[in-house]
Image: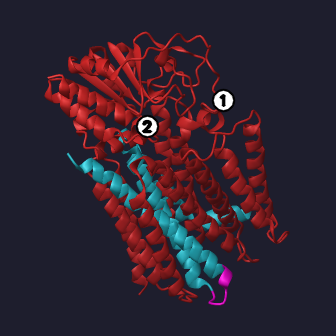
Amino acid sequence: MFEILDYLKDHVLMINLLIITIYLGFEIISKVPTVLHTPLMSGSNAISGIVIIGAIILVRQADSSDYLTLVLGAVGIVLGTINVVGGHAVTNRMLEMFKKK
Amino acid sequence: MQYIELLYIVSTVLLIVGLRKLSSPSTARNGNVIAALGMGSAILVSIFSPMANDQGNLLYIFGAIAVGSVIGMVYSKKVEMTGIPELVSVFNGFGGACAVSIAILEAYKFDASSTIGLMGTTYMALFIGGVAFTGSLIAYGKLAGKVKDWKSGISSYFNLVWLALCLGLIVYQVANPSAYEYLPIIILVVSLIYGLSFVWPIGGADMPVVISLLNALTGIAAALAGMVYGNMVMLLGGVLVGSSGAILTILMCQAMNRSLINVVVGGFGASATSVAADQGDIKETTANDTAIMMRYAQNVMVIPGYGMAVAQAQKACKELDKSLTSRGVNVNYAIHPVAGRMPGHMNVLLAEADVPYNKLIDLDDANSMLSDTDVCLVVGANDVVNPSALDDPGSPIYGMPVLEILNAKNVIVLKRGMSKGYSGIENPLFFHDKTKMLFGDAKDTIETLNNEVKVMD
């Protein structure tokens, strides 16, 4: 139990940021028109690909003989990149169609 | 060189600004570009910032990024506009899988010095990422028509038990880290199965809500992974997606007048009870009659649905619209918030066919215009015009706002056959006195209507 409290205490700054960002996320989206729900979902989906950074850090720190980490980490990077690149590209395609008058 | 990490802050700001701009129609395109720049810079920083115990391995990193970029680009260019919801779902699943691969590797690095908080966070990232992964794949399969709804009375109990099992195993593992070597793998498998069993029973029209929910989950998994690495941009980016995804999910539920619990626990359509068999007769009409009716109408309202999109009838519809408009008929399009496979999906499909934005009328305005409408042309729409939502408390969609097209003087329904809609609910509209059916492929029928209108002068 104390270990959990200690963990929270050591991460006070992070928890602060967490709360502010949760609130920010709610505020940013709270008045979005229905027309944009699909592009917005797709765009925020691309942003969730930020998890790729974890895979990159993992591979950077992996020993060059630790093939399990290297391969599984690389697979993670591939999947994350598909999420990021594909997500932004498909969102752009959708939004392009709104532009034409 | 430590200053390079300050660039993470720039990336975070770009992500926030990008998301903000994405939620307003005039700035959405820029928003997407800004968010992409933020992502790009964050990824570059993560590759080049100085790091303790750095082994390089740049070949693996750049190789993987190149492969992922090519796959992502190819699929996003190749996809039909009607297939976008499926694709978004798959992409989201990959994000979840990425979180899973990190978390499982981290889980096997734990030693005596690892704190409970760190372990708990990692296992939660594993669990949520796993649920987002398999859940998204099932959602993809359902949208693409490859996976059928499956529902039985016990599925929600099974899900509760399974969820408790997942969380129980995680608590046990964190409390006894070295008890069983294979427990992290078992937690992974149980999480993956929970993702399947959680999404599988959720029926037809609720899929957009589920995809949005899974998207929020992927964001939360990313945020948890960010806590594991103490990486701010991962944490904040993930939380931003998690919280904005959560509110978007709630907004979608509101558009359908349903609660989130209802969506997740109660099936919608999969177990639709059939209404009494005595529905009256259907009345067929001909293209010629319909064309005459529209040609001499004052106001025509088109109600597009997913059926229009699969028949690729948007362009034909736009041509018919042009012919009628040049002959003094007012043509508008009534867009239900959940027309298509996702909210706003229909607007994208019509925009692709160059239908002017100001002709797209949203639900409330359309409903107030319908009493002055002479002809309502329903093109491949089903559930969004179902009058059961208004007057049949026994219907699974009772209470959902729909287009009240029976207020119009005439209703023509273009349909291929008498099959039920995506949600599998019977539609009494087709048997109503005011309704006439015009069977056939939507694109061919609309082209025929257009030719008939043209030869009338």
What span is colored magenta in the figure?
A63-68
Magenta stretch: dominant secondary structure:
loop
Q: Position of residue A21 (x, y in %)?
A: 46, 56
Q: Chain of mark 1?
A: B
Question: In the figure, is residue A80 to the left or right of B133?
Answer: left
* Residue that extends furthest to the right in the rendered view of this protein: B179
Question: In the figure, is residue B290 to the left or right of B255?
Answer: left
Instruction: Please name whichever residue, A87 or B164, is drawn nearer the observer in this view of the structure.
Output: A87
Question: In the figure, is residue A40 to the left or right of B324?
Answer: right
Q: How much space separates mark 1 and mark 2, taking CA atoms?
A: 22 Å
Q: Select label 1 or label 2 by which is in front.
A: 2
Instruction: Please name whichever residue, B25 or B354, is drawn nearer the observer in this view of the structure.
Output: B354
Q: Position of residue B233 (x, y in %)?
A: 46, 67
Residue B33, compared with residue B394, is above or below; it is below
Residue B344 in sight: no
Residue corresponding to mark 1: B271
Color used for chain B?
red
Residue corresponding to mark 2: B306
Whether the magenta-drawn stretch holds residue A66 is answered as yes
